[in-house]
Amino acid sequence: AQKVTQAQTEISVVEKEDVTLDCVYETRDTTYYLFWYKQPPSGELVFLIRRNSFDEQNEISGRYSWNFQKSTSSFNFTITASQVVDSAVYFCALRDYKLSFGAGTTVTVRA
Amino acid sequence: EAQVTQNPRYLITVTGKKLTVTCSQNMNHEYMSWYRQDPGLGLRQIYYSMNVEVTDKGDVPEGYKVSRKEKRNFPLILESPSPNQTSLYFCASSPQGTMNTEAFFGQGTRLTVV
C-alpha cells in the first residue's frame, strides 16, 4: 500500500515570511518518485518538482526549496520570502506503479 | 502544444442522467488516469489505463466507467450520476515505464449533480 500524508491542512502567513510544507509518504517499493504540484485559485495543477528515491540531494529553485530525507520518508517543501502569488493549494504526490496524492495544504499569504 | 484536454469544463446535471466527460492527450502517452478532487481529501484516483484496452480500478471507482479504445482518448462515464459525485475531476497522462516524468493534467471539469 502507499500513502501520502500532508499533516497541515492550512497555513496562513504574512508576506515575506518563510513557509514549510510537510509531506510524509509510505511505500514498500525501493524505486519511487516524489512530486510537488501547485493548484492556484484558477484551479489548474502546476508541476513544481520531482525527485527519485535514489537522489537525496536537496534542491533550490528560486524561492522554492525541497528537502528529501529517505530515513524519515519525508519530502518537505519550503517557500522563502513568500509572496501573495504563492497563495495556492500544494499537493505532494508519490508514484510507484500509480500516482497518489496527499490531501493538500492550503497556503494563504497575506499582504 | 503538448496538452491534455477535458470537456466540458463545467457541467450541471440531474441525478440519473448519463454523462460522459471526455479526455484527450496529444503526447502519445501510454498512461492515463482520472482523479476526483474533494475538499480535505486531495486527489483520489478513480481509474487508470496503462495502454489501449487496458484499464484498472483506482481508489474510488464505484459509480464510474472508463474505456480506452484509442491511445489519445480516455473518457469518464457516469451511467447514473448521484449527488455524491459532485466534484472536481481531473484527467492526467504520462509516459508509461518512466516514473520520473510528471503527470500532465487537464484543466479540470467541475461537475454538479442535483
Image (spheres, helix red, strand yellow):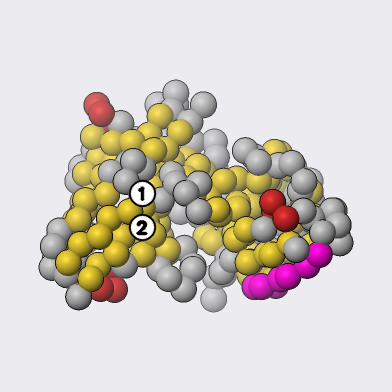
Check if mark 1 and mark 2 are on a common chain.
Answer: yes
Left or right of residue A17: residue B86: right
Quarter of the rendering occupied by the C terminus of chain B: bottom right
Q: Position of residue A14 (x, y in %)?
A: 17, 66
Mark 1 vs 2: CB contact within 8 A? yes
Numbered label attached to residue A106: 2
Which residue is label 1 attached to? A9
Host chain of mark 1: A
Host chain of mark 2: A
Q: Is residue A35 visible?
A: no
Q: Which residues are magenta?
A: B8-14
Q: Residue B53: say if magenta.
A: no
| Rendering quarter of residue B17 | bottom right
- Please tell me which residue lies in front, B21 or A61: B21
Quarter of the rendering occupied by the N terminus of chain B: bottom right
The type of residue carrying mark 2 is: Thr
Left or right of residue B97: residue B76: right
Q: Residue B12: say if magenta.
A: yes
The span from disc 1 to disc 2 (Cα, nearest Å) is 6 Å
Q: Could you tell me which residue is drawn at 23 percent across and 71 percent down?
A: A110
Within 10 Å of disc 1 (Cα), the crowding (few <14, some 14-19, many 20+) is few
Q: Position of residue A31 (x, y in %)?
A: 41, 31
Q: Could you tell me which residue is drawn at 32 percent across and 46 percent down?
A: A8
Q: Position of residue A102 (x, y in %)?
A: 43, 44
The type of residue carrying mark 1 is: Thr
Left or right of residue B13: residue A5: left
Q: Could you tell me which residue is drawn at 65 percent across and 46 percent down?
A: B46
